[in-house]
Amino acid sequence: MEMTKRSLLGGMFGTTILGNVLMGASMANTNPETIPDFAKWQLSEKEWKNRLTPEQFRVLRKSGTERAGSSPLDREKRDGTFVCAGCALPLFSSAMKFDSGTGWPSFFDHLPGAIETKPDNSLWMQRTEYHCARCGGHQGHVFEDGPRDKTGLRYCNNGVALNFIPSA
């Protein structure tokens, strides 16, 4: 996985506090059983493999990361909604998107009830992973180096984990 100075520093500093804040807020405000059709998305590994491309399966179901700069959604500028590629739950509005310079689609906020978070200690640093609240698909990680005039957060998303629906 390629890492820029910005994403590396965002992951190294402040993530313990960020993770605790996000875990409390997210887990308190989001219960996947209250999201319509939650049970419908409890699929077997075989069902997910049949539904997704191999790269989508690797990212959404195995917490993989796509190569930086590989997603056309990083350059998407139209008005619309970014939805989970696994279950089509709306996760972000285009108004929440910004160019982070990291090579991944980045957002300063998410739609209410759309994501849940958990600590991720899979590398040599603690990070906060977020995933779709309906199907549990891995989306990316959240860091504290987003736009200061907004939330200050950067939801760094794998483009392959998203689909874009342009506004009519």
Image: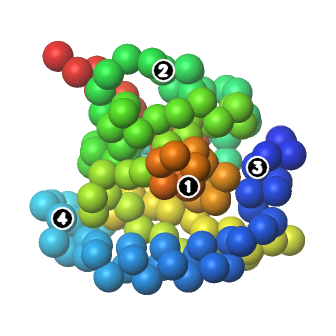
- Identified at 20% across, 74% down, the residue is 33
Badge 3, how many Cα within 10 Å: few under 14, some, many 20+?
A: many
Q: CA distance from mark 4 to mark 2?
A: 27 Å
Label 4 or label 3, whichever lies nearer to me, is 3
Quadrant housing the C terminus: top left
| Residue 51 placement (x, y as % from top left) | 37, 43
Q: Is residue 60 visible?
A: no
Give the answer, above or below, for where 41 lies relative to 58.
below
Q: Disc 4 residue type?
A: Ile
Which residue is disc 3 drawn over? 7
Give the answer, above or below, for where 155 lies relative to 128.
above
Choose the circle earlier in sequence order: 1 or 4: 4
Choose the circle earlier in sequence order: 4 or 2: 4
Res 153 label: 1
The reply to whether the C-beta atoms of the residues labelled 1 and 4 are less than 8 Å apart is no
Which residue is disc 2 drawn over? 76
| Residue 56 placement (x, y as % from top left) | 52, 42
| Residue 7 placement (x, y as % from top left) | 76, 49
Q: Disc 3 residue type?
A: Ser
